[in-house]
Image (spheres, coloured by chain):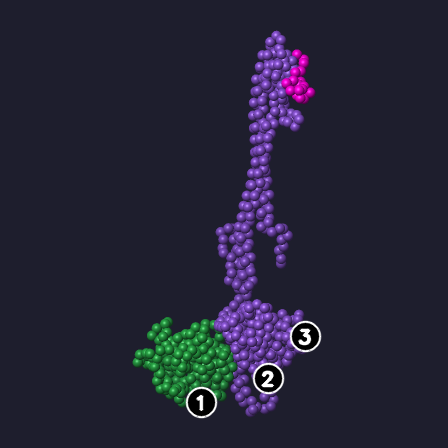
Chain colours: A green, B purple
Amino acid sequence: MARLIGQDVRVGTRILTVEDDERIRAAVKLALEDEGWTVDEAASGEEAVVRFLRQPSDVVLIDIMLPGIDGFELCRTIRRSSDVPIVMVTARADTHDVVAGLEAGADDYLTKPFAPKELSARIRALLRRARPMSSAHSRLIFGDLEIVPDEGKVLRGGTEVHLTKTEFRLLCELAQNPGRVFSREQLLDHVWGYGYFGDGRLVDVHIRRLRTKVEVDAANPRHVVTVRGLGYRLQQ
Amino acid sequence: MKIRFRAPRLRTRILLMFGVGSLALSAFLAAITYNFVRTNLVDQREESAVDQAYDNAGRLATDLRSSSPNVQGSLDRLGAERPLLLFRGSWTAGDARFSSAQLPDRLLVDVAERAVPSKMRLEIADELVLAVGIPLEDVDAAYFEFPTVDDVASTLRSVGLALVFAAAITTLLGVFGGALLASRAIRPVTVASQAAQAIASGQLGTRLEPTDDPDLAALTDSFNDMVVALQARVERDARFTSDVSHELRSPLTTLSTSVEVMLARRDEMPERAQVALDLLVADVARFRGLVEDLLEISRFDAGAIRLDLEDLLVSEFVRQAVAVSTLPRSRVEVDPAAETLVIRADRRRLARVMANLIDNARLHGGGDVEVSVTVPDDGGPTSAVRILVEDHGPGVPPEERLLIFERFARGGSAGRRSFSDGAGLGLALVDEHVRLHGGRIWLDDRRDGDPGACFAIELSAEEI
């Protein structure tokens, strides 16, 4: 949580890749270094935890299928202490893996075999999200909910709640136009940088995670409301 | 191996057996009853007739013992049924129609010559009668009577009729019972055939319920064993494809990532290395497409595909799908009637269908494509929408239009589909996807008659 916000994404951006296949790791390192990023490697979840503690990264890339502690567990472990953007690599897009990974705290996912261009595009989108929002308002208030965009802070009933960067970005997006309904596609586009064919589950799972943090009762949300068949809306 | 049956349907045979069986049984019982009743009735009737005849004969003998008997008068006074008397060698009849001529010889000899009382059944003028003869030796006479037993016959006729009726009802009941039993007997067969159909349609988890009936248990057990074996084989095949594709994904990720790193340095390479790199890049992309298709189709085979269904405005969907395809500038024409139609579909999967069709047109259809959204003009209310992808290639002859959706299908005519098209899994996947959406896809001539193919997808749709 102590990461500096607002640094240039190109300078000193560190990416931790957690992958047990040595060749993939080496190739990904080459490709990401071509983008100008510094790449740290870990061959297992255990190694990744130690590396991340020693040298926090700006983005973590996790293969879900890992020996020892698996990708889901690693996601949860990192999430307990950090809001760092996480991209997970899954075997399939249509299995429960994707939802399980997102619920474990991942911000986005890729399926194997992925193209390096997709990977760097995903990472760039996450890094953009990590920068502060340029907001017209310095403080937005929704009942017991208070958003301070410039500081990246959210308070519920006066106490700060810790959101990941993606959750914060999603909340701010909804807060830009209170009461307006945002479709899944709009949120996918504005928050993740996906077009019409993005995976709507990204939005659904993140909304779910957001609710557990900003709502008093996540099962009966008062702020982040579903508008059936249309999308989501933020209200008082 | 086929096991043939030429006999009529099982149900018909069971019905027939029961019908014939119950008919035979009831006919047999009716015949026995009839005979028994007849014997009893006739015997009783005869007995009373004989008693009556003895009574009459006794009274007549008393009359004849007088000094000057009035034979005719005594006979008439008896009031007997058709009496006949042989008195001192001369015949006297009570009824002119019944004379000594009607007496059978044997009866006459027995009674008149040997003086033995005797009786005999006769049919005279279509009437069943009993001839009773009683010798009256002390007055030198023989008395005969012809009492009718025909009233018994009419009773017998009624009994017979009733029995035929009963037999008919029993037969009908038998047929009815047969029908009930037939459908009960057939039920396991019906259940088995439904199960077989379910299995054929891919529900390999289908099993027959175990039964206590030892005869059916044999069928149930061997059926279930067969399905288990079949399922194991299908799963093994599917798992093999899936495992192979999964194993390929890791090296493929390394390959495409490394190739990308090389591609970034293409300008620093000697010319020959550049040519080699271009070949490598193209085939790694092709290999990637093939592995992705194989993974996808193995998921179809495993029945592991779940659609993420949502309502999509079909016109917007098609425009977006074309915009992200390999021919993003293709013309999209939407029929005004189709502009506001909504389909229920998995956005990303259906987009792959469009991408595959457009890729197919790019590779084999002259590199140019027109996409249209129309409604079928069947006159009724709009319940379906058609997405047409038309190209300018050489088209596909009608006899190959179904085969083209088979896995690894290639055009039969040499050269028409170039080798670079890779393995023909794309259209097989398109077919699977469309069917999973409850729609259908087919291949047609271009609507304007120019050479070229027209892929048509029809999906159910409704107005917003």
- Residue shown at 31% from the left, 80% from the top: A159
- The crowd level at tag 1 (other Cα within 10 Å; few <14, some 14-19, many 20+) is few
- The crowd level at tag 2 (other Cα within 10 Å; few <14, some 14-19, many 20+) is few
Q: Quadrant of residue A172?
A: bottom left
Looking at the picture, does residue A89 appear above or below residue B144? below
Left/right placement of residue B160 relative to residue A110 reads right
- Residue shown at 41% from the left, 79% from the top: A180
Query: Does the stretch in magenta take in A69?
Result: no
3D distance between C-alphas at marks 2 and 3: 27 Å
Mark closer to the chain start, 2 or 3: 2
The reply to whether discs 2 and 3 touch (Cβ–Cβ < 8 Å) is no
Q: Which chain is home to disc 1?
A: A
Say which element carries label 1: loop
Residue B317 coordinates in the image, percent (x, y): 52, 77
Residue that mark 3 sits on = B413
Q: Which chain is home to disc 2?
A: B
Q: Quadrant of residue B339?
A: bottom right
Q: Quadrant of residue A137?
A: bottom left
Q: Nearer the viewer, residue B16 or B303?
A: B16
Left/right placement of residue B416 relative to residue A107 reads right
3D distance between C-alphas at marks 1 and 3: 54 Å
Q: Nearer the viewer, residue A21 or B212?
A: B212
Residue B51 coordinates in the image, percent (x, y): 57, 20
Q: Which chain is home to disc 3?
A: B
Q: Say which mark, if any, is on residue B279.
A: 2
Looking at the picture, does residue B187 appear above or below residue B426? above
Identified by mark 3, the residue type is Ser
Residue that mark 1 sits on = A10
Identified by mark 2, the residue type is Leu
Residue B24 coordinates in the image, percent (x, y): 59, 40
